[in-house]
Image: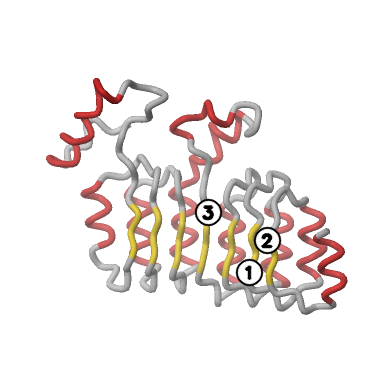
Amino acid sequence: MLRSASSLAAGELREVRVRHCSDDALAFAAERSPKLSILSIRSSPSVSDRSMLSIASCCRMLTELDISYCHEVSYKSLEMIGQNCPNLIVLKRNIFNWLDSSEHIGIVPDDYLRDCPQDGDREAIAISKFMQNLKHLVIRFSKLSVVGLNAISGGCKELEVLDLYGCANLTLRGIQQATSNMKNLKELEKPNFYIPRSSFHMGRYGHWQLYDERFQTNVFQI
């Protein structure tokens, strides 16, 4: 379908929203869609940096990109897109919920759940260096730390919407300090600091989160 649509559009394709597309199909479409503005390929585990290079090279008018839940897309793709697509203002890079990996059994490869999300800070640094015109950034369940968040706040001065839901390596104090200089920020989705229900009984451990938020100790964060 993606190949057919890009061929029939004869260079006029401007928006693509697909799931489970292949590397080859995406590269094929990229080479024939110089006016592409919106690309959403969320939940496409076959897409890798190879086809994203084609997107970066051929689709320089890109303004919105959603590469959530794409196993094989790395920080290198973020660098390439950022360098070649200066008009990009919306990026969605959600990661699978690594706090409760049980919900992904049989769907997401175990090695991805273990390894890929570890690049949170590296991806954040790539975003801060090469995507400085972003206005809307969604990076749910990323393992970025305050180092990565500080990089984003320092490099992405135009951000209006920042979604950090599920980023459990961050603290409220770290978020407040990092975002204090983001003058254009209108919407901030903070991480939920509750311990996952699948791992602990909230009735017994829920008070830890209240203590941590009040005194900013971060000693009970998981």
Q: Which mark is residue 17?
A: 2
**How many angstroms separate mark 3 from mark 2 (CA)?**
15 Å
Quadrant of the snapshot with the C terminus:
top left
Q: Are marks 3 and 1 in contact (CB under 8 Å)?
A: no
The disc labelled 2 sits on which kind of residue?
Answer: Arg
State the residue at coordinates (39%, 64%): 161
User: On the rendered structure, is 126 left or right of 61?
Assistant: left
Secondary structure of the residue carrying tag 1 is: strand
Question: Which callout, 3 or 2, points at the residue further toward the start of the chain?
Answer: 2
**Disc 1: which residue:** 38
Secondary structure of the residue carrying tag 2 is: strand
The disc labelled 1 sits on which kind of residue?
Answer: Ile
Quadrant of the snapshot with the N terminus:
bottom right
The percent position of residue 194, horizontal first and vertical second, equals: 30, 35
**How many angstroms separate mark 2 from mark 1 (CA)?**
8 Å
Q: Nearer the viewer, residue 59 or 99?
A: 99
User: On the rendered structure, is 41 left or right of 209?
Assistant: right
Question: Which callout, 3 or 1, points at the residue further toward the start of the chain?
Answer: 1
